[in-house]
Image (cartoon, rainbow, N blue to C red):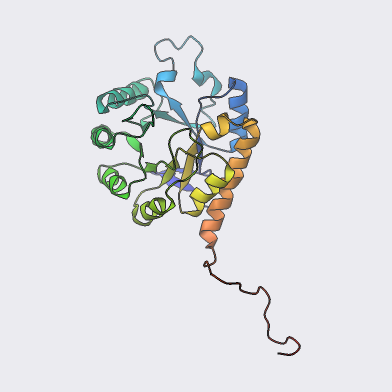
Amino acid sequence: MDNLTIAGKTFESRLIVGTGKYSSAAIMVRAHEASGAEMVTVAVRRVNISDRTKESLLDYLDTSKYFLLPNTAGCYSAADAIRTARLGREAGLSNWVKLEVIGDERTLFPDNEGLLIATRALVKEGFVVLPYTNDDPVVCRKLEDAGAAAVMPLGAPIGSGLGIQNVNNIRIIREFARVPLIVDAGVGTASDAALAMELGADGVLMNTAIAGAHDAVAMAEAMKLAVRAGRLAYLAGRIPRKAYASASSPIEGLVGR
């Protein structure tokens, strides 16, 4: 398999996983291992950065195995997202950030205006910014122009498990993107992840689909295999769709022909 490179850093796995909603820390650790992921997202607000002597989510993440991607989950303004990113960096998490600026509490759709403001500001401060955004090709292009290291359009609302709702938009974003495209949010099962990769996504980020599964560890392995299969299928090139049948075996030489 070919590798995923973002901002000069290379990953063998194209699957990025989260740390929320697991039934226990032990299950999370096992699921991460089964996923084969090398990058793990961590909500800055869930990390105890004021007193590192107390139990923290970081106690269950082996930073020698996983690259931490702090995220600004729960931020509803550019100012809050910028402040949260800075806190994560000052706490020693990373100068990378999965940037979220939420615009609507019910749908958790992003506030793209605030997202652009925060992206520009954080890029100027030396952050590697990976913004979560709508599946809007125009907004993705503006985020690239603002200095985003990747674009991360949603496949469907966060945690919905609906799968990719607008296949054509993902195709258009892939066609014009000059930076890696990571499908973020909406994946429900392995076939959703495979489809994202078959459309040309460079990677898939997910949390609920694994953490909320009846068997999170088994689902993590399924997602690992789906991402690999989808990437291979994309590189191999699918056959054209046809309205009628096309015989697999040649007809030349058949009796009566």
Q: Position of residue 197 (x, y in %)?
A: 50, 50
38 in relation to 1, above or below:
above
Q: Is residue 221 visible?
A: yes
User: Depth check: 231 or 65 in front?
Assistant: 231
Residue 90 image-quadrant placement: top left
Q: Position of residue 187 (x, y in %)?
A: 51, 40
Query: Which quadrant of the figure contains the C terminus?
Result: bottom right
Seen at 59% across and 26% down, the residue is: 29
Task: Give the farthest residue toward the bottom.
Answer: 256
Horizontal side, residue 220 vs residue 55: left or right: right
Residue at 53% of width from left, 29% of height from top? Answer: 64
Q: Left or right: 212 with respect to 82?
A: right
Rendered residue at 50%/19% (across/down) = 57
Question: At which x and y percent is residue 227?
Answer: 55, 46
| Nearest to the observer: residue 194 or residue 96 | 194
Where 51 sits versus 216, above or below? above
Q: Could you say where residue 140 lies in the image, as x and y percent from the top left?
A: 31, 46
Which residue ends up furthest to the right in the rendered image? 255
Q: Nearer the viewer, residue 35 or 164?
A: 164
| Residue 1 seen | no
In this picture, residue 68 sits left or right of residue 36? left
In the displayed structure, 76 sits above or below 149; it is above
From the viewer's side, name the closer residue of 241 and 139: 241
